[in-house]
Image: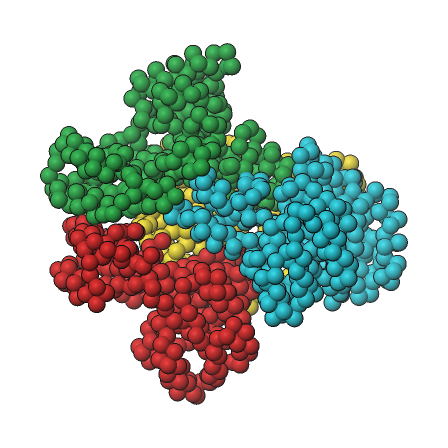
Chain colours: A red, B green, C yellow, D cyan
Amino acid sequence: MTTATLLVSCPDQKGLVAKISDWVFSHGGNILHADQHADSTAGLFLMRVEWDLENFDLARSEIDPTFKKLATEIQAKWSIQFSDYVRRIAIFVSKQDHCLYDLILRQRSHELSATIPVVISNHPDLEKVAHNFGINYHHIAISPNNKLEQEKQQLALLKQYKIDLVVLAKYMQVLSPDFLAEFPQVINIHHSFLPAFAGANPYHRAYKRGVKIIGATAHYVTDELDEGPIIEQDVIRVSHRDSVTDLIRKGKDLERIVLARAVRQHLQNRVLIYGQSANSDLGLRTVVFD
Amino acid sequence: MTTATLLVSCPDQKGLVAKISDWVFSHGGNILHADQHADSTAGLFLMRVEWDLENFDLARSEIDPTFKKLATEIQAKWSIQFSDYVRRIAIFVSKQDHCLYDLILRQRSHELSATIPVVISNHPDLEKVAHNFGINYHHIAISPNNKLEQEKQQLALLKQYKIDLVVLAKYMQVLSPDFLAEFPQVINIHHSFLPAFAGANPYHRAYKRGVKIIGATAHYVTDELDEGPIIEQDVIRVSHRDSVTDLIRKGKDLERIVLARAVRQHLQNRVLIYGQSANSDLGLRTVVFD
Amino acid sequence: MTTATLLVSCPDQKGLVAKISDWVFSHGGNILHADQHADSTAGLFLMRVEWDLENFDLARSEIDPTFKKLATEIQAKWSIQFSDYVRRIAIFVSKQDHCLYDLILRQRSHELSATIPVVISNHPDLEKVAHNFGINYHHIAISPNNKLEQEKQQLALLKQYKIDLVVLAKYMQVLSPDFLAEFPQVINIHHSFLPAFAGANPYHRAYKRGVKIIGATAHYVTDELDEGPIIEQDVIRVSHRDSVTDLIRKGKDLERIVLARAVRQHLQNRVLIYGQSANSDLGLRTVVFD
Amino acid sequence: MTTATLLVSCPDQKGLVAKISDWVFSHGGNILHADQHADSTAGLFLMRVEWDLENFDLARSEIDPTFKKLATEIQAKWSIQFSDYVRRIAIFVSKQDHCLYDLILRQRSHELSATIPVVISNHPDLEKVAHNFGINYHHIAISPNNKLEQEKQQLALLKQYKIDLVVLAKYMQVLSPDFLAEFPQVINIHHSFLPAFAGANPYHRAYKRGVKIIGATAHYVTDELDEGPIIEQDVIRVSHRDSVTDLIRKGKDLERIVLARAVRQHLQNRVLIYGQSANSDLGLRTVVFD
């Protein structure tokens, strides 16, 4: 079955559910899933609608222009994705292989509906892993001096491979604002329960603070380090018996699972970002329609 | 704000979201929450819609008859509840007080939108707790010989107090099919992760089996013991260090929280039961629209 | 059965388990539980030993002086508690009653082995709750101007009631360094997953940040606000569907459970504090021998 | 550092902690970890002691005979393992690769201290995975008719590869009592929260029952199907939105993690089995010294 998914946000007002579901229905679309949320603080209405394209009476090229009329009327931001469009992911890694293996294996077992044509790294270490699965590997060494230049190479590769989404799978490097301005679709896994232990060495700091639970956070990357909108988090219990090494080991399982869930939610068009910046009154947040 | 909530289930077919939301909208109702689910195995569509009654152009007495036309067309089972109708709960207890206190305190702090006019028990022990909060207490001793007779007394009290919902808060007695035929709205808390350790003494059996996690289950009561549709479950980790007494102590926190969540979901008209019996091909299940 | 519990910490060295368990055994004590931990970063050995006092050949008054010889040899900090000494708790509250009820009910059901002779509050609201359970209630209003003076009254009450432990059950006031210098045994519940959202209004800030999990933290109180050694933490999943009000409601269950666990661990002499300050290299941490 | 680990169980009696730790200390061993448990129902004392072998005054060949004297005195069952002995694991698989990959990658990243010289399967599907990591693969097809014969081949391979532990990583076959009599060290992962949904198709049955949480269980294999002593369990929340396919997908993460934890605990000599059969009064249980 081929489906279309509409993600839409607009100022809250009366009749939005009816108007939007009616638009789908009046064109012959059978709604499979509809979920909506009203954020009363923000005065925003957010909705996800997925419908069967069989018997839908609009050609794909007509869908956007046709919906635009309703969208303009309700002052909406919106996007429509089709289930048969397979997104292309570039995975950025450093030296750790656990998230890389995890994403590849989930993609191979059809948990992630996407292709992974390329892995990009600032280190040569994981080339063999990528090649084992027939994935191209580009080693682009980053130093403080050559960062912007090397990022241009990375961006050129993203263009060349027609990448839709970058996943930072323990990349351990900060992307520059310039990079993000040109390619904003980036998901990162941070190895702490943000906002606790933002920044470097979260496991060491968690150990020092003597917390009884550690976490991991998957979020979209923004200019503000570790402040991007959170997609998914999870935690695991630790005790005094766990050394920093144990925290790192336990955390690896969290990182894998949290990152994979976030990427899956993104690929299924379940995530809507809204708000302003993380430090504004409203915050910068996600709705995850699960 | 006063709202109406429609819970509806019907054979799955095209256009149901649009039809139902359109019905609300066409009568001037502003949809606050809409959630739906399609169970493809059962071929069923299930939906919850809550809307603001301000500006709704139907009087309350007209809503049911008016919706009936659409309901008949789509072959729906359905119910509509109003947020200003405060449900009346009878709590059945035995000797343990933790769930009783918990429900009363949540009701007092407005977590549970209901009144609790009466506590009924087969033991006199908890009379003082009920009276402390100004709640009537009826001691109806149950023995194998007088059970049906005593249940008639209980049913008379439910009528007298105009009870909408019975909550078995560690009642430790099985209600007869006759009781349930006359008063089917009953929620129970079972002190295990059902279907594990159905029946008596679940903590002792969990200890003996050496499980590493224990649980609690809130479910609607049916004629089949511990087989009613599950509303909510939760678990907690245990270890060899925990004796049966420790399992009981840890379990009490689970019982409280799981029961309270289930009662709250029920009171907010979030729970739809569907299917056949627990032993049928389809099972007897709930959708909890959270 | 009456038991003695030794909590001991000292520089790590060879033979400590044997020496300490041998000391107990050589005096006729039967060890019921022994647990130890070595923190290699701190170079510290920490141990908890609990033994049956029946047949122990030392009178209570002899135990401390006798153990002192071994303690001096191994350069230990240590304390010994007896299971028949019932600790006396003062609960400090503000206006919220959920943690107060929870602690009292757990004490009444023997989950907490202690007495609660007094509740102290900066508001009059919860007097009736305390009195219902036959507990004295002192209303000592705190304002920025009279804080130190009022704290002296509080300290006088702690003396008068022979209090061993103060539990801040949503007290919402910061104790002064002077108070803590005179009475350092204080456990607090903070309504966030520390160190995330230290300080005021954690639920509002958690909402704004869009976290997918919220938490609660029980810790000993030190001069550094929200930086005291953590005893227990727990978390619960939230989503965009949860308003700030929902976070507060869900958090109340966490607060209750986390605080009760911490108090219980403390009363059972399971918690050892070690390290320096939260901001030192080593941190200020607990071992919880569970 | 090379260590020895003693796992010991015996009838509970006075002075055991002191006697055992004294035995280690008197031979010059520095105890690194000591943990013990008394099961009062069974009247059993169980202990794990790990000590540094540097300066230990017994040669390896002398350790067993020397400890035997104390063991006989206290009527103990016991075993001693050395940390430099690397256990050899045979992984049994069927067609699913997620647990196989997981175990291999954890072994490669030194989370599991063992070697994996061979993978044995009743299907040819995963040969390439094993070969990618330089592991031998034997395809031994099992049918109802040839089972005992094929198991003899499997047992011959275990001998040939000098295997210490068999891990059933979604093997989907029941081992015969004959197999287990000859090779009893077998860990299995069952895809449910045992004892719920023992037997076949647990995810389908969990779906039908409408549970709100699913689990996985790692246990030692015994003659009684799915009744072996439990080593580790974990769970994940599900809802009506999850189809059977979703349960299977979510369950795969549980299976991986629960199996890996159990294997790791076993390899670190942290698991002691005691009791009778799962259906006896005492049960057949584990102590996991973590």
* Residue drawn 21% across the image and 64% down it: A59
The image quadrant that residue D44 belongs to is top right
Residue at left offset 69%, top offset 59%: D90
Q: How many marks?
A: 0
Across and down, in percent, residue B249 comes to 54, 36
In this view of the protein, can residue C97 be seen by the observer? no
Viewer-proximal residue, C284 or C216? Answer: C216
Compared with C75, C62 (above or below) is above
Percent position of residue D21, x then y: 78, 52
Q: Position of residue D238 (x, y in %)?
A: 44, 47
Q: Nearer the viewer, residue C139 or C131?
A: C131
The answer to whether D121 appears left or right of B265 in the picture is right
Left or right, A282 with reference to A19: right
Q: Is residue A140 visible in the rendered structure shown here?
A: yes
Image quarter of the N terminus of chain D: bottom right
Specify whether D220 is left or right of C282.
Answer: right
